[in-house]
Amino acid sequence: MVFLKFCECKVLLLCSNMGNEKRVENPENGHGPAAVHVLPEKKRNLPNFFLSVKLKYVKLGYHYLVSNAMYLFLVPVICTLLAHLSNVSVENFTELWNHLRLNHFLTVILCSVSLAFAATLYFMSRPRKVYLVDFACYKPQPSQKCTKERFMQVAKGLEGKLVIYAQDIGEIGVWPSDIRTQGLDAVAGEYSMAAAMDETDVVIFGAIDDLLAKTGVRPRDIGILVVNSSLFNPTPSLSARIVNRYKLRGNILSYNLGGMGCSAGLISIDLAKSLLQVQPNSYALVVSTENLTRSWYRGNERSMLVTNCLFRVGAAAVLLSNKFSDRRGSKYRLVHTARTHKGADDKCFNCVLQQEDDKQNVGLSLSKDLMAVAGEALKINITTLGPLVLPVSEQLLFFVSLNAKKVFKMKIKPYIPDFKLAFEHFCIHAGGRGVLDELEKNLKLTPWHMEPSRMTLYRFGNTSGSSLWYELAYSEAKGRIRKGDRIWQIGFGSGFKCNSAVWDAIKTINPAKDKNPWMDEIDEFPVQVPGTYSLFKSQYCLSCQHL
């Protein structure tokens, strides 16, 4: 139908142009047939309808039509019902009730009891709603910062002369605690357990202290604790360290996740959500962090130097609740979580691997297949999450496209749903610039949607599982979160895993009334990120410098 309308418009425009042409007869010497010259009239400034009417508005109208089709169908039904009920008097209702009471008393009692039982069963068995009361991200102290120039000077002392650094990380980096206390020379020196514990204590206790101060929740009220740190897992565990520091109650459900990569933050959220379903009226504390002191790579293997470039010190503490009384004071409601694991595939399993190099230096090796593996994992995760969040209009378009390709063997590109119709904000794990570029292109996102992820990578680097919360804090600091907005968090991790969490904003966030790691400098962002060239054929956006 649209194609016919298009052809009809073209025919009308063509006829209109032919009608506006002038015919001029110039007889030669007054004899013979006149030579007819068709002179076009001066071009009129008519609007180009095919350029002015953008397809995105047509698609948006289709989206609104399909999404509200049920309401459009119910309107005439409700109007007809109301018109019929307007003719029924009170006496008619009284007569109907008396008839049922006298002739079908037992039926009425059974129906009433069944209805009450079904309602009770529903309210008792339905999933408990999980609310995000608040969260806090660790803001590094000035003593923890160093310039990129200073780092390059120290790097000269390392064995070998090849140093790789990330151009999309800002001029100021945040480094481990032993750098803070002993100077940057510790990069090439000893990595003691005491220094690593000092780093972890500073970041996780700093984030938890800020969170408890913001929410006013007492430590003994917390019934669930989930901590994730991929590369640093001391004994006793980090979760036990938190229990000891804050004197949490003895029957707390405590979990410590290790070795699960940068997506462990969302895995912890999913675990806490499951625990809150069976623990009524409880608080769950989720802590995400990573340790650089013990995971710093001191060799010269290119694929293992990448982590030295991207990873930085950071931590986030998140407080979840299933208490109905916390609904009004909470920021977000957890709507969905989706987890994808590609560990059964050897290529996916080995793309991020902690191992030793030729000189027995332990580091994290990143394969050149990482981007392809991440894309495949994201595709499966989207397939799981899409039916839960996408509007009906997008699901219909995807279904039609899939059938046209599979059933009718039509050579068309697969339809990529427009996730901007399902979410207002995107928090994509700041694992590297290459990953962000690919997701922006494949999901057809705008620079505005990618800004929180890119600025987090630039300012704070890759803080592993906590990076998603720095990104959400950026959107809050910019004053972008409005009541009813939907947020999609996407995390990638070794294994290989892709996890998602969907949040619904309960209230509008006022950045002026909220403590936020970005607030002191939010007016300076966004910034222009310098260009880079790749290390592994556009897989990692890094720059190489030979010293």
Image (cartoon, helix red, strand yellow):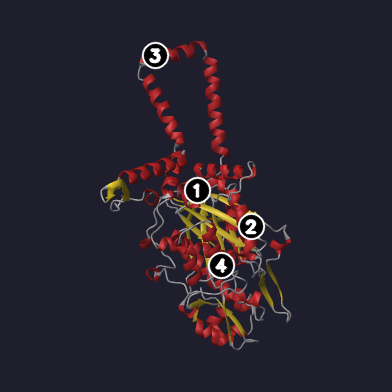
Residue 525 placement, left or right of 307: left
Q: Which mark is residue 92?
A: 3
Q: Residues within 10 Å of mark 3 (few under 14, many from 20)?
A: few
Contact, CB < 8 Å: mark 3 with mark 1?
Answer: no
Disc 3 is placed on an element classified as: helix
Q: How far is mark 1 from mark 4, CA to CA?
A: 41 Å
Q: Nearer the viewer, residue 43 or 45?
A: 43
Q: Residues within 10 Å of mark 4 (few under 14, many from 20)?
A: some
- Mark pair 3, 1: CA separation: 45 Å
Residue 375 percent coordinates (x, y) = 61, 59
Quadrant of the image containing the C terminus: bottom right
The numbered disc on residue 376 is 2
Q: Are marks 1 and 4 in contact (CB under 8 Å)?
A: no
Q: Residue at x 46, y 34 (%)?
A: 70
- The span from disc 4 to disc 3 (Cα, nearest Å) is 72 Å
Tell me the CA gap for discs 1 and 2. Answer: 38 Å
Image coordinates of residue 462 in percent, x first then y, are 55, 69
Which residue is tagged 1?
323
Residue beneath disc 4: 434
**Tag 2 or tag 3, which sits nearer the N-term?**
3
Query: Mark 3–mark 2 contact, CB under 8 Å?
Result: no
Mark 4 vs 2, N-terminal side = 2
